Image (cartoon, helix red, strand yellow):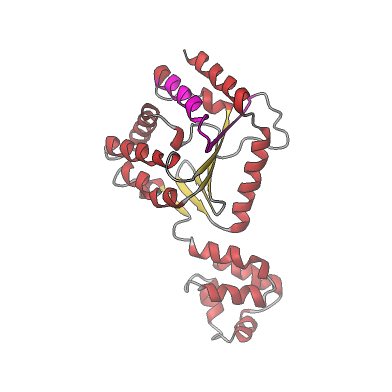
Amino acid sequence: MGKRLREIRKDSGLTARELASRAGWHESKCSRIENGRTAPADDDLRVYALHCGAVDQTADLIATARNIEGSYVEWQRMERSGLRRAQESVLPLWERTRHFRAYSSWLVPGPLQTRAYITALLSSIRDRRGLPDDLEAAVQVRVGKQRVLYEGSRRFAVLLEESALRHRIGGSEAMAGQLGHLLTLATLPNVSLGVIPLGTDRTALWPVEDFWIFDGSQVNVELVSAFLTITQPNEVGMYLRTFASLADLAVYGAAARTLITAAIDSVE
């Protein structure tokens, strides 16, 4: 954060002392903020943006500062007591979200997963990361979260690469059951399910990292080592535009069902 503010100030041609003078601050305040010794308040960020000619960056600066602590959380930290805590950590977000957008190239997203699929995924994570064994509790929380599909006036727009239908998770029986469950969920009036066929020309936009968008104001991305939370309006906007472009590549309705059915046939 400090480095970004220093760049904004330098791009404006102001010295730290000049900015402090214009802002009515003690001359050491800029240095403390830019070197990370003092966390900037929202008003401090507005002052930087105003006097450095970067008013258009104000919203991004404030969102970044507010989310510094939670923007990058290592799985090791989130899962130190087991998988249940990680599952529970997103419950408030899911409860307040009304419009969910999800893109996945490698897995069926959480709300659409069967219990068998969830169990296979979480047991693999537990074993791979050497976590405390609270598998059953974690599975129960994850299954319970799926009530958001049926409660309230929530909308779900889900995009899957066809490859996500082909990656076998939990064995043939579990995978066939999962794909059949997708066919059922696709009939829900609040669920839009699109599949991007393997043969689609991807010159303009190739597969990207899996991500979730919540009400157009927050993005979550799962990395190998950590969980990202993105709230800066500019970055969220990039994901919204990417989702829209990916949606244009997908097929829906009967065409999507044909791809899912073909994946079931290949498993069986």
Q: Residue at x 65, y 42 (%)?
A: 244
Residue 116, located in which quarter of the rendered image? top left
- Quarter of the image for residue 235 reads bottom right
Quarter of the image that includes the N terminus: bottom right
Give the left or right position of residue 109, taking residue 57 as reference. left
Please provide the residue range marked out in magenta: 174-198
Q: Is residue 177 left or right of residue 31?
A: left
Residue 186 as seen in the image, left or right of residue 51: left
* Residue 69 position in % (x across, y down): 44, 60
Q: Position of residue 243 (x, y in %)?
A: 62, 42
Magenta segment: does it hold 238?
no
Q: Measuring from the top left, give residue 67's x and y in whole percent.
A: 48, 60
Q: Nearer the viewer, residue 148 or 120?
A: 148
Relative depth, front residue between 234 and 52: 234
193 vs 151, left or right, is: right
Residue at 52%, 30% in the rendered image: 186
Residue at figure coordinates x 67%, y 70% from the top left:
54
Q: Nearer the viewer, residue 156 or 204?
A: 156
Is 166 above or below relative to 12?
above
Q: Residue at x 69, y 37 (%)?
A: 205
Q: Position of residue 120 (x, y in %)?
A: 37, 28
Query: How many marks overall?
Result: 0
